[in-house]
C-alpha cells in the first residue's frame, strides 16, 4: 500500500459524525419501540453506551489506520430554541441531549484524538448550512478546544444548499466538505473523484456510504457486507476515492449489533485490495491544488505540511 494516498490504486476515507456522546431520552424511546426494557440501562449512572471513542480508537489503532471525527457545536433546546419547540418531537430530536464541545470530558477526547494522529473536524449544526456566521462560530469553538486549525467536515443531517453552503464553508476557512451524499442510498452517485465546485483549492469528498443506508446491519449482516464488498471492488476497478461514515454510537454492540464488525471487515478488505485508508484531511493534503491568486497548480510537496 502506497504511503501517498494519490498514488494508491484507490482510497478509503474513514469518517465519524459525533452527533451525541450520551444516550438520554433515546433509552425510553427504544424501550417502548422495541418493548425491551434493557434499553433503560443507558440511563443508569456510570453507564454510557454512546461514548465509544476509546473503542473506535483501539479498533483503528489495531488495524494501523486513522480516521476523521467531526465534532458539533449545536444549539440547546431549552437554552437556544423558542418555547414553541420545547414540547415538539422535532425540537427534541434536533436539539435535546446535545453535548458541549468544551465539556471537559469531550474536550479531553478531542485532544487525545488529535494527539494520536486522528483528524478532528467540524460537524456543522443543523442550521449552519445556510448561516455562514453561525458556521464560522462553530468552527472557532471546535478550534478553541483543539488548539489547532480545523480543515474540513460535514453538515449535520447532510444538509446542503449547493453551492451556497460550500461557499460559506470556504469563507469560514474550511478546505473540504463531505456532505454530498445520502442517508438512505449508497454508491458513487457523484462520481469517483473529489470535486472542485469553484475550480480552486476547496474540495468536496462525496459520501459513498453511511452505515444507516446499507442493508440492515443488525438483521442482515451478510447483505450489508455484500454491499460493502461490491463498493470496494468498484472503487478498486475505478481508482476511486470512497468515503464512508460510521457514527461513533454505532460501535455500541448492545445497541447496534454487527456494526463494529462490519467496519473492521470493510477496512481489512480495503487493505487487501491495496487501498490507502485514512481521513479525508490527509488525502486532501496530498492533492495538488490550484492557486487562486496566481492561477496555477501548487504541488503538495511545495505546500506547507498538513499538521492533522
Image (cartoon, helix red, strand yellow):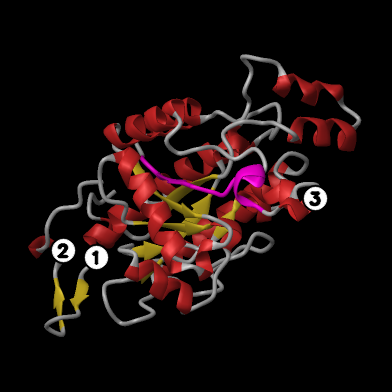
Please provide percent x and percent y for residue 255: 71, 31
Which of the two residues, 56 or 4, is positioned nearer the viewer here? 56
- Residue 24 is left or right of residue 1, and the answer is right
* Quadrant of the image occupied by residue 186: bottom right
Tell me if label 2 and label 1 are in contact, CB under 8 Å.
Answer: yes
Residue 174, compared with residue 83, is above or below; it is below
Mark 2 vs mark 1, CA separation in Å: 6 Å
Tell me if label 3 and label 2 are in contact, CB under 8 Å.
Answer: no
Say which label, 3 or 2, has the lower sequence index. Answer: 3
- Residue 19 is left or right of residue 69, and the answer is right
Q: Provide the secondary structure element on which disc 1 rests.
A: loop
Say which label, 2 or 1, has the lower sequence index. Answer: 1
Q: Residue at x 62, y 49 (%)?
A: 211
Residue 89 marker: 3
Going by the picture, which residue comes out furthest to the bottom? 295
**In the image, residue 28 lies in the stretch drawn in magenta:** no
Residue topped by disc 2: 300
Q: Residue at x 34, y 60 (%)?
A: 9
Residue range of the region highlighted in magenta in the rendering? 66-81
Residue 231, compared with residue 274, is above or below; it is below
Which of the two residues, 255 or 135, is positioned nearer the viewer here? 135
Residue 128 marker: none
Residue 287 marker: 1
Q: Residue at x 14, y 69 (%)?
A: 299
Mark 1 vs mark 3, CA separation in Å: 43 Å
* Quadrant of the image occupied by residue 112: top left
Say which label, 1 or 3, has the lower sequence index. Answer: 3
Q: Residues within 10 Å of mark 3 (few under 14, many from 20)?
A: few
Going by the picture, which residue comes out furthest to the front? 83
Mark 3 vs mark 2, CA separation in Å: 48 Å
Amino acid at each position: 500500500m502506497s504511503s501517498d494516498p494519490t498514488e494508491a490504486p484507490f482510497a478509503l476515507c474513514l469518517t465519524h459524525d459525533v452527533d451525541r456522546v450520551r444516550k438520554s431520552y433515546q433509552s425510553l424511546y427504544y424501550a417502548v419501540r422495541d418493548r425491551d426494557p434493557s434499553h433503560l440501562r443507558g440511563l443508569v449512572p456510570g453507564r454510557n453506551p454512546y461514548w465509544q471513542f476509546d473503542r473506535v480508537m483501539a479498533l483503528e489503532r489495531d488495524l494501523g489506520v486513522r480516521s476523521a471525527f467531526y465534532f458539533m457545536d449545536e444549539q440547546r433546546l431549552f437554552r437556544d430554541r423558542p418555547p414553541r419547540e420545547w414540547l415538539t418531537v422535532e425540537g427534541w430530536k434536533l436539539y435535546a441531549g446535545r453535548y458541549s464541545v468544551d465539556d471537559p470530558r469531550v474536550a479531553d477526547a478531542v485532544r487525545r484524538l488529535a494527539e494520536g494522529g486522528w483528524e478532528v473536524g467540524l460537524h456543522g449544526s443543523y442550521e449552519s448550512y445556510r448561516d455562514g456566521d453561525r458556521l464560522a462560530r462553530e468552527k472557532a469553538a471546535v478550534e478553541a478546544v483543539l488548539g489547532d486549525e480545523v480543515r474540513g467536515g460535514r453538515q449535520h443531517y447532510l444538509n446542503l444548499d449547493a453551492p451556497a453552503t460550500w461557499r460559506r464553508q470556504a469563507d469560514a476557512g474550511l478546505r473540504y466538505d463531505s456532505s454530498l451524499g445520502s442517508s438512505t442510498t449508497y454508491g458513487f452517485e457523484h462520481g469517483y473523484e473529489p470535486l472542485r465546485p469553484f475550480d480552486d483549492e476547496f474540495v468536496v469528498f462525496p459520501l459513498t456510504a453511511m452505515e444507516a443506508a446499507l442493508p440492515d446491519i443488525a438483521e442482515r449482516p451478510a447483505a450489508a457486507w455484500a454491499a460493502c464488498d461490491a463498493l470496494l471492488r468498484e472503487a478498486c476497478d475505478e481508482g476511486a476515492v470512497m468515503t464512508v461514515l460510521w457514527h461513533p454510537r454505532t460501535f455500541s454492540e448492545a445497541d447496534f449489533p454487527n456494526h463494529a464488525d462490519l467496519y473492521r471487515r470493510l477496512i481489512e478488505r480495503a487493505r487487501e485490495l491495496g487501498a490507502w485508508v485514512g481521513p479525508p484531511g490527509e488525502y486532501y493534503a496530498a492533492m495538488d491544488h490550484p492557486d487562486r491568486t496566481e492561477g496555477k497548480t501548487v504541488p503538495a510537496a511545495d505546500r506547507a505540511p498538513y499538521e492533522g
